[in-house]
Image (spheres, grey):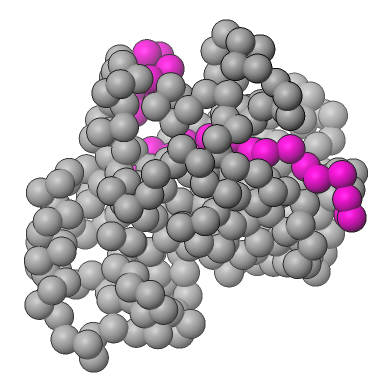
Amino acid sequence: MRFATIVEEGRLSVAVVRGQALLPLSIQDTGLGSLRAIASSGDDGLRRVHEWVQLQPERAYRPIDDVEFGPAVPDPGAIYTIGLNYAMPGELHDDRPERPMVYGKVPTAVTGHGSVVTWDRALTANVDAESELGVVIGERASAVAPEDSMRHVFGYTCVNDMSSRDPWLDGDQWLLGKSMAGFCPVGPSVVTRDEVDPADLRLGCAINGIAIQDGRTAQMRFSVAEVIAYLSRHVVLRPGDLIATGTPARLAGPIGPERHLQAGDVVTVWIEHIGDLTTTIA
């Protein structure tokens, strides 16, 4: 299944996505009222949602272009970001680091597909966009083995890990440099784990239609399962937590790696089988 968070009368609500239409989830089940609640409900909750959806008439669906999107994961308990997780060309498996590099973003950084993001340029003038596979945690995970990790995944989404490159933030204040309001666009939807194999997905990023990233998740130094296992050894992962699993290298051209985001830019982060996540910079 595919879930989105939409804005209705100033409030966020969950919807089920089907092609170019979506169905607001007005199920009379208090345990399924939010994306986080659905993530925590396990296979039984997904079954209940599916059964409810099957009973709804076609007229209950809305065209997807007629709605305003909120963050696909509107209230993550925690956001973990994995640094330097994509191998360079020719790199061998034995060349990878001993363990994943873990950063973080604060939950208030999230925003939705189609949002407009701006920030105080006096704080940072140099901000980049990065395409990342987002993993949404379902079942609580603590000290799990890699071979058991994937059952703790609820689904996958696109994450734009916007980050400051100014040395006073990127050098020693990573949390602040990654966590300004809007610096974590998430969406447009969350696709449940039974519909996506994360092992070798193509993903990338474009600014104004010009590609700046193009890679595959097969380049990850640490797989989704290994990242979950490593994190769960140190922290408790809870339903609705979000993991941004790293980003492929910036392309050499035509924009080049030194070109940062500017007012008026339209950024598109995309992952095959998941979707396109668009953000406008103001």
Residue at figure coordinates x 22%, y 52% from the top left: 38
Q: Residue furthest bottom?
A: 59
For the N terminus, the image quarter is bottom left
What secondary structure prevails in the magenta region?
Answer: loop
Instruction: Using the image, determine if residue 47 lies above or below residue 257.
Output: below
Look at the image and give the residue range highlighted in magenta.
228-255
* 68 on left or right of 282: left
Residue placed at 39% from the left, 55% from the top? 190
Residue 34 left/right relative to 199: left
Residue 170, picture quadrant:
top right
> Is 264 located above or below residue 85 in the figure?
below
Image location of residue 110, percent across then percent down: 52, 51
Q: Judge by depth and name the residue closer to the eye, 166 or 259.
A: 259
Query: Against 124, is 146 above or below?
Result: above
Q: Residue at x 28, y 83 (%)?
A: 61
Q: Is residue 14 magenta?
A: no
The image quadrant where one finds the C terminus is bottom right
Residue ID at (57%, 49%): 202
Please provide percent x and percent y for residue 234.
40, 14
Q: How many marks?
A: 0
Q: Is residue 253 magenta?
A: yes
Residue 35 location, x and y as percent? Answer: 30, 54
Q: Is residue 68 visible?
A: yes
* Relative side of 273 to 85, left or right: left
Relative placement, left or right, of 54 versus 199 is left
- The x, y position of residue 153, in whole percent, is 32, 38
- The answer to which quarter of the image holds residue 76 is top left
